[in-house]
Each structure stands twice: as C-alpha cells, then as structure tokens.
Image (cartoon, grey):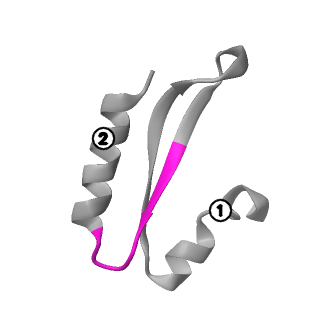
Amino acid sequence: MYLSDVCTIPSSLAGHTAMSVPFGAGEGGLPVGVQVLAPALGEAVMFRVAAALETARP
C-alpha cells in the first residue's frame, strides 16, 4: 500500500499543501487528475490554480 501514497507523502511530511483536481478522462475513459502543490500556508494560491484547472479542463 505504501506505493499508493508515494506521490503524496513527501509533500505532507514537508508541510506543503496539496490537492488533486479532476481533469477529464484519458485513454480508455479512465479518469485523469492533476496534483496541485503549494508552499505552507499557500492555500489561497492553490485554490486559485485548482479553479483555473477546472475551468480549462476538456
């Protein structure tokens, strides 16, 4: 199970904020997500980037 979290644990341990934003479907209809990272206390910028990604998704 550790390999399932390999992309999220380092940022959590460093205190960075992170979120996953749905970004449509890829090959074979599988869902695609984009991970957005921000520095500590950078939630406002992270949410603005996530909103822009949701607006731009195909």
Tag 2's secondary structure?
helix
Seen at 77% across and 60% down, the residue is 3
Which mark, by number, is residue 7? 1
Q: Which mark is residue 57?
A: none
The answer for how far apart the CA atoms under marks 1 and 2 are is 22 Å
Q: Is residue 33 above or below residue 35?
A: above
Residue 28 is situated, as x and y percent measured from the top left of the image, at: 72, 15
Number of residues whose C-alpha sits closer than 10 Å to that of mark 1, classed few (under 14), some (14–19) or many (20 or more)? few
Q: Residue at x 51, y 52 (%)?
A: 35
Instruction: Assign a secondary structure to mark 1.
Output: loop
- Proximity of marks 1 and 2: CB atoms separated by less than 8 Å: no
Please indicate whether residue 8 sits to the left or right of residue 58 in the image. right
> Where residue 52 is drawn, which disc sits there?
2
Q: Is residue 26 left or right of residue 52?
A: right
Question: Measuring 32% from the left and 51% from the top, which residue is drawn there?
Answer: 49
Residue 40: x and y in percent read 35, 80
**Residues in magenta, as a range:** 34-42
